Image (cartoon, rainbow, N blue to C red):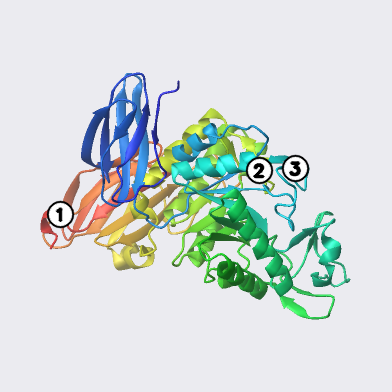
């Protein structure tokens, strides 16, 4: 048995006892931390009942002879969807390892990729069949995996393409085709053809299929997929289709037909997020491709998408197919640092131990031990600090607080430039306001030749210590705490001194990403 801590659920209600499973041979003493403050200590064997906790993110630590074991728990809902996937449904498959990974990475939603018989006939194959690309599927396995998700508190999202019809079903639907300028149906490869997703007869069929999948399989909702094209097309009857508007109509009709379902629509390469983000769905999900190739591009996409819904980016790390795990892990770390620091999450991990390197999820990548360790550290870090990262009310104040004109909150290094954009060779700085607090994000791009998110990365250079300068409020000193998913998993205080109207704190050098929490008004002075 590998020693580890696993929360019993991926998220806990405020009135629910928080239980952590300690996979250890003997009793364990768990210390519970909230934003660097110890709030509880519990000793037990096996299942550790931590009692109820106020809403927020918490770190849980157990000291063993081999070092510290850690996990994290979220109480309440800070407004994020931590999304994973499954893509294998062979008869007799055990769901235990998948359930463990859902708990390990605190995945609140799991996409069931290509579970259906056919794209336009979801349940037409009976209890066992081959999907459209020949993969074996047993509905008994699908149901078992759905139940495993429910046992952890995660929700199960069935994959459903919103306008794709296979060759066998196409004769029944070709009158609704989306046609290219040559009069040919738009298609995906040579086995799927595209139709108008807003056409009423198609929507009646599609929503009936979705309802049947909820009733017979147990899905909580659906991942509604598209392929990013066409943007505009004509139908055989000559009518012009604005596909963005058809997608909005489709989402509205699916919501009307399944009012209780969770819905996530895929905005491929940000199309058409400007329209669908406000449609009645439960998250804003964007699958990114060129020209969104740099860390800056990811940040811009997230900033455009942020509103009143969780934001998830599907940024497939193809780099694992061409570079060693060590360099690929760094690429993943920079991607996660960018997304997390901008209030979004990353669809990457799933199954029991796999990551996505391809849009066809069946071609997933077995994660190396280093990658699994990275994911656990970073997903724990996300959950432990979720209330500083994900709430919609957080405000980016970088342009209002930093640089010499503002002189309110900034970080400098002796030999490393600091910028408010991702720039090779420097530190990318962002300041976010969270009530009476400021959250400073520092992403270390020293040693990098470019800022591509899907490319092998070099070990970050040593910036040396940073100097945080904060304008004081009143006569006291702010409190400054620092955390880093690779070097200091929970927030720790750093000394702060007076410098005229300002307070100054020396920060340790960041590795990939450092989070700095500044309490502008010390607790004893808070009104």
Left or right: residue 291 compared with residue 461: right
CB atoms at circles 3 and 2 under 8 Å apart? no
Residue on which disc 1 sits: 523
Q: In x, y percent, where is residue 491?
A: 29, 43
Picture layout, residue 385 above or below residue 472: above
Residue on which disc 2 sits: 139
Residue at (70, 52) in percent of width and height: 123
**Could you say which is closer to the camera, residue 5 or residue 59?**
5
Left or right: residue 160 compared with residue 501: right
Residue on which disc 3 sits: 129
Residue at (43, 59) in percent of width and height: 420
Picture layout, residue 348 above or below residue 192: above
Q: Give the quadrant of the N terminus.
A: top left
Q: In x, y percent, where is residue 135?
A: 74, 40
Foreground tag (1 vs 2): 2
**Could you say which is closer to the camera, residue 244 or residue 115?**
115
Does the rendering let one see residue 287? no
Q: Residues within 10 Å of mark 3 (few under 14, many from 20)?
A: some
Distance from Cα at disc 3 to Cα at disc 2: 9 Å
Label 2: state its secondary structure: helix
């Amino acid at each position: 048995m590998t020693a580890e801590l696993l929360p019993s659920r991926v998220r806990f209600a405020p009135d629910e006892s928080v239980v952590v499973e300690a996979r250890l041979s003997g009793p364990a003493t768990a210390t519970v931390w909230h934003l660097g403050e110890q709030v509880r200590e519990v000793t037990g064997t096996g299942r550790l009942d931590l009692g109820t906790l106020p809403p927020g993110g918490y770190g849980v630590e157990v000291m063993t002879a081999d070092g510290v074991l850690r996990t994290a728990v979220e109480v309440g809902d800070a407004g994020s969807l931590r999304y994973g996937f499954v893509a294998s449904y062979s008869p007799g498959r055990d769901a235990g390892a998948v359930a463990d990974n859902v708990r390990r990475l605190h995945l609140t939603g799991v996409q069931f990729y290509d579970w259906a018989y056919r794209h336009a006939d979801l349940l037409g194959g009976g209890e066992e069949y081959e999907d459209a690309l020949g993969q074996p599927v047993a509905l008994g396995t699908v149901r078992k995996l759905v139940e495993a998700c429910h046992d952890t508190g995660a929700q199960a999202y069935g994959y459903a393409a919103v306008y794709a019809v296979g060759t066998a079903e196409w004769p029944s639907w070709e009158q609704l085709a989306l046609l290219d300028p040559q009069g040919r149906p738009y298609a995906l490869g040579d086995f799927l053809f595209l139709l108008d997703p807003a056409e009423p007869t198609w929507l009646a069929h599609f929503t009936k299929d979705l309802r049947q999948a909820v009733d017979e399989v147990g899905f909580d909702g659906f991942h509604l997929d598209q392929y990013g094209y066409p943007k505009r097309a004509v139908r055989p009857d000559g009518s012009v289709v604005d596909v963005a508007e058809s997608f909005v109509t489709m989402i509205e009709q699916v919501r009307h037909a399944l009012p209780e379902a969770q819905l996530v629509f895929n905005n491929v390469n940000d199309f058409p997020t400007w329209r669908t983000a406000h449609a009645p769905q439960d998250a804003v999900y964007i699958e990114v491709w060129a020209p969104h190739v740099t860390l800056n591009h990811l940040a811009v996409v997230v900033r455009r998408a942020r509103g009143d819904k969780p934001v998830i980016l599907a940024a497939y790390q193809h780099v694992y197919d061409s570079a060693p795990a060590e360099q690929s892990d760094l690429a993943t770390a920079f991607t996660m640092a960018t997304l997390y620091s901008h209030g979004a999450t990353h669809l990457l991990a799933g199954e029991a131990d796999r990551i996505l390197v391809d849009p066809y999820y069946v071609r997933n990548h077995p994660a190396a031990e280093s990658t699994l360790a990275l994911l656990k550290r970073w997903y724990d870090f996300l959950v432990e600090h979720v209330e500083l990262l994900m709430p919609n009310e957080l405000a980016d104040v970088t342009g209002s607080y930093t640089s010499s004109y503002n002189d309110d909150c900034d970080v400098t290094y002796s030999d490393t430039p600091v910028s408010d954009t991702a720039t090779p060779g420097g530190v990318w700085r962002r300041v976010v306001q969270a009530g009476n607090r400021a959250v400073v994000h520092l992403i270390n791009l020293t040693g990098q030749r470019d800022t591509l998110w899907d490319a092998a990365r070099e070990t970050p250079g040593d910036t040396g210590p940073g100097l945080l300068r904060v304008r004081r409020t009143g006569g006291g000193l702010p409190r400054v705490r620092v955390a880093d998913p690779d070097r200091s998993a929970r927030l720790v205080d750093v000394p702060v001194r007076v410098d005229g109207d300002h307070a100054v704190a020396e920060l340790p050098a960041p590795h990939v990403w450092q989070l700095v929490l500044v309490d502008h008004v010390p607790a004893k002075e808070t009104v």
